[in-house]
Every structure is written in C-alpha cells, then in structure tokens.
Image: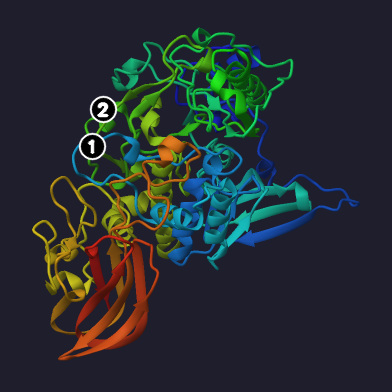
C-alpha cells in the first residue's frame, strides 16, 4: 500500500528551501504530505547543465524561441501548431520518438472528448480547430486504421510549420530562472545524440502531463484527491488522500483462419473465472480493455516501472483467461497482434492557477467569461485499485458542455508558465472530465494562441487574461475553435455587414446564417447555409458588401458532420459509429470569386477538399462582394457552409 498523503497546496520551492518545515520533516521520516516531494534539484538551479568532462562527446546547444512547449501529446502538438501559425518561433520538446502521447502507436488510446459525453439534443459536440483538422486528415489518409499513420499525420503537421523546431527523444531536465517567478530557459537532454540543450524563451508551456517543466520551475501543484469539504464536491472522498486514477496497458488481437494457441509466461496474473473480473465485460477481443488499470494507490511518476510490470502481468492474464480458461471457446482462432509496453497514464500532478475548476462548474455547464476552450466528457472516476477492485471500473456522471476558463491554464506563482492537458488547474473530480485528449487538444490550441499573443505584445499570461481576453477569444473563434456563449465580433471581418443571398436554401438552413457568428449547430439553431437538394442549377452563396471593399483573404468553414464521432480507434464497435473517409457533408469542389458589378473574378479553385476550415489569400483587390460556387460535395446532396469571413 502506498503511504498516505494529504492533498494540500504546497510549492516545490518551499520544500527544497526548507521553508515548509512540517512537510520536509514528513518527507525525511517517510510520513506526512507527499503533495510536493523533494526531487533532485533542477540542473538549472546552479545556472546551467552539470559540468561535462574534457573527454566528453556531449555537445551543448543553445536555442532561442518565443514559445517553448514541453510535451508532444495532443495538447502539446496543438499548442505548438497554434503558436507557430500565429508567427511565434517555437521549440517543441518531446521525450518519445513519436508525437501523440496516449494517442500514439506506443499506447493506442483513441482520442475522445465532449462528443463522447452522450449528450441529448442537437448541439454539435465534436471539437473543432486544430484537432478537427488533424482528425480529418487522419481519417482520409488512414482508412486501414494503422496506428503508425496517426504518428505520421502528427509528425507531418509539425514538420510543415517552418516556425517549429522539433526535438524528439528529448527530455526536459531542468530550468534556468531569472527570479523565483520567471523562467528564462528550459534545459533538455537528448541521449541518443549526446546533446544538451539550453532553450531560451519568453513563454513556457508545460504539456508534459506529469508537469516536469513546471515543477522544475517551482510552480505550485498538487497530487491526489481533495476532501469533500475543500470545494464542497459531492463526488470527492470524505478525507483527502494521495490516490489517483491508475494507468492502462492496451493490447490488440487478430482473428486467424486456424487455431492460435497462447502459452503465457509464468509471471502473469491469473483470472481463472469470469467472476474474477467483476463488472468488466470482455466479450470483444480485437482491442484491449481500458479497465486493465492499476497504480492509482502508488506514485504514478516514481513507481511507473512497477506499474508497467504489474499491468503487463494483468493484461496478459486477461488474455490468458480469454484463451485458456475454457469460458471463451470462440477465441480459439484469435491471437495477440500487439501489446503495449508504455503505460497510458491518466493522472499525476495538477498545477494550480488563478482558478481551480471544480465539480460544480462541470455539472452546471458553467460559461466562464474568460472561457477559451470547452469540455463535456462525463465526470469519469475510477477506483484507485483498478482491475483488482471489486467495484465497477468507472463511475461516469453525464454533464452538459462547459467552458474551461483561461485562469486554469497559467501558473499562479510562475509568471510566464502556462499549461494544457491533464495537468491543468482542476480538482481531482473536475479532472475526471477535462483529462481526455480532445479536450486537452483544444486547451492546447488556446494556450498556444495565448502564448504567441504574449510574445508579440510583450506581456505575461495573467496580464493577457486581464487586459485582452476578448482579443484571445476572437482569435480562437477565427481559427475555428468553439467557446460557449462567444460569437464572432471581429471588427475586421468585412462579411459581418454584408447582404447574403444564395441559389437556394432549406427551411433550417438560411443563407444568412453564414455571418451570424456561430459555426456549429447549437440546440435547434443550425447556424449554417444548406442548399435545397432539389435545386437544379449550381449551388452558390453570395455576399454583397454595402460598398466596395479592398480584400485579400477569405475564410470558409464547411460542415464536417460534427454530430458524429471521428477518431482513430482499434475498436471495431467504436469505428462503426464513424465515417472513416472524407465526411459526406463536406464541400469537395468549389470556386471562390470576387465580384465587381456584373463581373466575377476567380480567386481560388479547389478540388478534393475534405477539410472544415479553409483560408484563401490572394493579391489584394477591390470587390463589391464574393461568391462561393459549390461544384460537388463528398456525398451529401446539399451544399453546407457554416461561416464565411472576408478581410482586407
């Protein structure tokens, strides 16, 4: 059993400096709080990397960037892409050989988010922005459902951005600080090339999950579960403790045309009967089981190797039960195809920002005024004992969509540190909803965008939130993110004042909705133009400006079926709910024209589109309006467009 700890707020710097004497005494004696533990002092504490001997082959490198992102999971990838696309120079540090974190080929968990919350009604719940772009690309390029193809999609997206320097197989090992509140550089090590990096930056984003960069900088954090009394959360335990959600190892199997025996190693865990796996359905075999979970009573960072070994024993024990117990004879022709060796980690450190998201916020569908992302996955809590618990493997409380406030995404005590992913400022209960990867991705886009704004404006994250939260929200909407209760108010968007007409429209798909400022269905408001499928001529929609305008850029947002799931999954049942190709609602071939009186000048012609968001930039010209002519869709009989914007 793990030693008990309370869940108090403690700064790691206090522990290292000995200012929190009660906590330090407990650490030295093996009792008391483990909320902030005395890990090795950062190499940056002495001003740089450890000394290197004269015969060493290690090379020191210094890099400079506006934004430094540590962690290449879905949060870190989206953060790096967002910052780079807004003109910031970015260094992305990833400690694995591939990007994607728990979605990568090393773990193979499918990306879920608010669209998995089971919400009733007609609101589109799938996340948009960068994560939608990546999902659409993967669905089109990977009909074979190869795990490595998702790795490639993410790698290609990052490689295509000239503003990103990608450091794979590189570990953040420390920081340099100008003061206790300000990071000047991240220190990183890449053993494979014998390189030590000093990465100087203006804003630092911790998307590592475990919070390695932030904890090295002394950012306040916590681990474990808060007591019910701390935030008045009904789902919290009566007393605070150090327990977390455990980790999981997945496996993949394949059916063959002949019997495939399985001889297990001697160290597996045995489950002779189905009753030994209570409440844990195991009737489908192609894709392992998220409930092969363990480690929630341990330190999921320091005890990760022990957790890996136990999970391998448990996962192979489950497969041995299926193959050899005699209770599942139809498994005779099935065989293991792949077994994960990297635990898919759910929970470890959670940083503390200016606000801590809590259970009540999620249940109430809170629309924070400083919202910059949204969630909606159920509050999903698991027994810390994992697979060995006689309880059900999860308690899921369905909730409405809710905004995630910007104040949860930057450190309360390190001025230029932001974070996104499972380490944001949230209680353990609220974390049960925010931790899933699509939600982490939209938070990543938010902090990446904010970091670029901070770098360009010369301000700190808290100052940006105080003085320019509206600017940040509008920029996120422009990039196809969604924030509850926020619509397009961009004063530079010329389309907002245009008169709209179309070749045809349906009763619930008025053409005028392309400039109403909302680009997804919300309840009974469709917020999109839908052409009448019975219309015989070409489908077109046209915007006429009150007076001629100088324009050089047009933004289009198409329908990509946000009411459906879309992700790479190795579960046949989950995949059956998707369209693993271009989405049929999407406009495929189209022509964009600038209007000048009775003449139309083509500025863009596109064939084979499958993306939701398209931006067309051209030489500036004066136009009285713009026309979008739809020549074909990916299958739907109607043309569907959510939004059109125009910029000088």
Q: Is residue 447 above or below residue 19?
A: below
Residue in the image at 47% along x and 49% along y: 416
**Where is residue 89 drawn, in percent x and y?**
53, 64
Seen as rendered, the residue at the extreme right is 55
Residue in the image at 36% along x and 82% along y: 618
Disc 2 on helix, strand or loop?
Answer: helix
Q: Find residue 106 and report its image quarter.
A: top right
The answer to which of 446 and 555 lies nearer the viewer is 555
Badge number at residue 366: 1
- In the picture, the quarter occupied by the C terminus is bottom left
Q: Is residue 571 above or below residue 4?
A: below
Seen as rendered, the residue at the extreme left is 507
Seen as rendered, the residue at the extreme front is 258
The answer to which of 94 and 461 lies nearer the viewer is 94
Question: What is the number of callouts on the image?
Answer: 2
Q: Earlier in the sequence, mark 1 or mark 2?
A: 2
**Proximity of marks 1 and 2: CB atoms separated by less than 8 Å:** yes
Disc 2 crowd rating (10 Å Cα; few below 14, some 14-19, many 20+) is some
How far apart marks 1 and 2 lie (CA) works out to: 8 Å
Q: Is residue 192 above or below residue 478?
A: above
**Where is residue 145 drawn, in percent x and y?**
52, 47
Q: Residue beneath label 2, please?
A: 360
The answer to which of 485 and 271 lies nearer the viewer is 271
Disc 1 crowd rating (10 Å Cα; few below 14, some 14-19, many 20+) is some
Q: Is residue 12 above or below residue 178?
A: above
């Amino acid at each position: 059993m793990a030693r008990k700890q309370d869940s108090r707020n403690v700064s790691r710097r206090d522990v290292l400096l000995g200012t929190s004497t009660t906590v330090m005494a407990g650490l030295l004696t093996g009792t008391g709080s483990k909320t902030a533990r005395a890990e090795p002092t950062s190499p940056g504490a002495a001003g740089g990397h450890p000394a290197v001997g004269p015969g060493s082959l290690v090379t020191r490198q210094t890099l400079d960037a506006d934004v430094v992102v540590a962690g290449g999971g879905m949060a870190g990838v989206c953060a790096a892409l967002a910052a780079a696309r807004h003109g910031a120079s970015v260094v992305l540090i990833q400690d694995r050989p591939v990007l994607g974190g728990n979605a990568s080929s090393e773990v193979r968990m499918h990306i879920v988010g608010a669209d998995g919350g089971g919400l009733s009604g007609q609101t589109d719940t799938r996340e948009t922005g960068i994560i939608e772009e990546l999902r659409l690309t993967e669905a089109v390029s990977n009909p074979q459902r190869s795990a490595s193809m998702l790795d490639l999609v993410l790698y290609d997206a990052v490689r295509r951005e000239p503003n990103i320097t990608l450091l794979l197989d590189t570990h953040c090992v420390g920081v340099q600080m100008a003061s206790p509140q300000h990071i000047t550089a991240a220190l990183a090590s890449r053993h494979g090339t014998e390189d030590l990096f000093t990465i100087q930056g203006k804003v630092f984003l911790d998307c590592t999950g475990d919070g390695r960069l932030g904890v090295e900088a002394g950012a306040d954090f916590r681990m474990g579960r808060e007591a019910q009394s701390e935030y008045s959360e009904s789902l919290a335990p009566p007393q605070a403790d150090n327990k977390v959600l455990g980790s999981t190892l997945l496996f993949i199997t394949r059916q063959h045309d002949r019997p495939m025996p399985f001889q297990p190693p001697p160290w597996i865990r045995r489950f002779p009967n189905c009753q030994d796996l209570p409440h844990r359905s195991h009737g489908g075999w192609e894709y392992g089981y998220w409930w092969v979970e363990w480690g929630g009573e341990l330190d999921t960072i320091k005890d990760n190797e022990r957790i890996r070994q136990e999970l391998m024993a448990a996962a192979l024990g489950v497969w041995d039960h299926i193959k050899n117990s005699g209770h599942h004879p139809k498994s005779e022709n099935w065989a293991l195809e792949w077994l994960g060796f990297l635990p898919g980690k759910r929970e470890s450190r959670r940083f503390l920002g200016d606000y801590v998201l809590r259970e009540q916020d999620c249940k109430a569908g809170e629309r924070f005024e400083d919202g910059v992302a949204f969630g909606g996955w159920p509050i999903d809590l698991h027994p810390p004992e994992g697979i060995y618990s006689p309880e059900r493997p999860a308690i899921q409380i369905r909730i409405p969509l809710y905004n995630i406030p910007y104040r949860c995404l930057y450190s309360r005590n390190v001025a230029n540190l932001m974070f996104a992913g499972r380490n944001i400022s949230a209680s353990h209960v609220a974390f049960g909803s925010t931790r899933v990867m699509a939600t982490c991705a939209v938070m990543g886009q938010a902090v990446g965008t904010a970091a670029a704004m901070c770098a360009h404006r010369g301000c700190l994250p808290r100052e940006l939130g105080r003085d320019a939260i509206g600017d940040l929200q509008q920029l996120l909407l422009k990039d196809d993110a969604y924030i509850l209760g926020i619509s397009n108010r961009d004063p530079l968007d010329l389309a907002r004042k245009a008169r709209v007409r179309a070749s045809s429209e349906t009763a619930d798909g008025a053409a005028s909705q392309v400039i109403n400022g909302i680009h997804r269905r919300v309840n009974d408001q469709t917020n999109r133009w839908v052409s009448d499928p019975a219309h015989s001529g070409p489908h077109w929609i046209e915007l006429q400006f009150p007076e001629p305008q100088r324009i050089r850029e047009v933004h289009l947002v198409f329908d990509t079926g946000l009411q459906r799931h879309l992700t790479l999954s190795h579960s046949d049942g989950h995949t059956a709910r998707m369209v693993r190709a271009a989405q049929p609602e999407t406009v495929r071939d189209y022509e964009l024209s600038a209007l000048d009186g009775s003449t139309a000048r083509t500025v863009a012609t596109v064939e084979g589109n499958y993306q939701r968001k398209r931006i067309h930039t051209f030489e500036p010209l004066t136009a009285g309006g713009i026309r979008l002519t739809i020549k074909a869709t990916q299958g739907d009989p109607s043309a569907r467009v959510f939004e059109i914007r125009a910029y000088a």
